[in-house]
Image: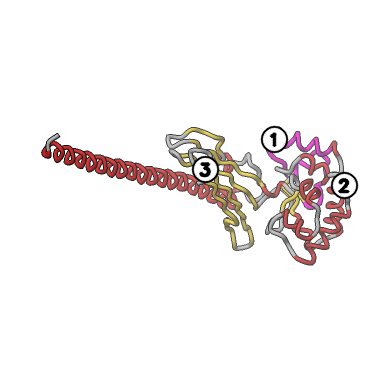
Amino acid sequence: MTTRDKETGVVLVNVLVVLAVAGGLMLLLVNSQDAVLGRVSRSADASIVEQIALGAEASVIDALRRDLDDAPEIDHLNEAWALDVIQDEIKLPTGIFSLQIRDLQARFNINQMAAITAGTQDFARRLMIALDQSPETANEIGRILKAVGPVQYLNALSEFGISQEAINAMAPYVTALPINGTINLNSVDPFLLAVMLQNDSHASQLVHMRERQGSLSLETLLGAGVLRPQNSGFTSNAYRVDILAEAGSARLQVQTVVIRRNDPGVKSVEILERRFVYVGPDGGGM
């Protein structure tokens, strides 16, 4: 090979190296652009689901506020306000959407035991017995809450020595709310209703009437010959809203606790707590 041939070969190798490096840089640039575009797309999808969820939440708050004017004497999820906003899972152009509402006053508010009365203590003891737990647990909870005041969550009682077994047994029927309020007979679980009435037959009768008519009222109870149990009512001012929204690669679950206030001269709906859970296309959190 001549010197010229050698030089030509070296130049060719150098050109190929430059082309390879340039090609690699171009590929890296394209991949980087794809990654940026992917991030932008995911961010846009996340923004869309967030706006959908917050818009749905605002609709619930507005409906609950209007209900204070339209029908303050009774609350149940068969009312027009609830049916207007509750939505089973459907497919929208953006993706999946659903909205559910849970009446938090369907359960016994354990914080009522912070200012315990003989009637409240008796009910709490009967509930513990019905749950196959020691009635002394109710006494312990009363002493704890009288000393420390209301708790934010039922599980907080474990910090004061209440067993997790007892807390788990109470969980389906007991909650911890920041407001005073009675158990709503229009949403209470049949088991808890039977404990309240101390009469399985009457509890079953009211459940059937509620299912048939959509709701109960004081007139309904009087007509059935059933006395309204202590610590019960027909209204609720504490709800949990569960929203699911999906758009593109983003999936968002929102849990919002809202509290209504219907005091003389003051009617409001306030967000007590909001929890966001973003889920990516692979099912993991974002």
Crowd class of label 3 (few under 14; some 14 to 19; many from 20; radius 10 Å): some
In the image, taking residue 165 as reference, residue 29 lies left or right, namely left
Q: Are marks 2 and 1 in contact (CB under 8 Å)?
A: no
Q: Amino acid at mark 2?
A: Ile
Residue 50 higher or lower than 268, as above or below:
above
Mark closer to the chain start, 2 or 3: 2
Please, what is the three-letter code of the amino acid marked with disc 1?
Answer: Gln
Q: Residue at x 14, y 38 (%)?
A: 8
Disc on res. 213: 1
Q: Locate residue 102, reporting x and y percent.
A: 64, 44
- Residue 199 placement: quadrant: top right
Please tell me the numbered disc located at residue 279.
3
Instruction: Say if the magenta span includes residue 222.
Output: yes
Point out the tag, 2 or 1, that comes first from the N-terminus: 2
Q: Quadrant of residue 88?
A: top right
Cα distance between the residues tagged 2 and 1: 32 Å
Q: How many marks?
A: 3
The local secondary structure at tag 1 comes to helix
Which stretch did the figure color magenta? 202-231
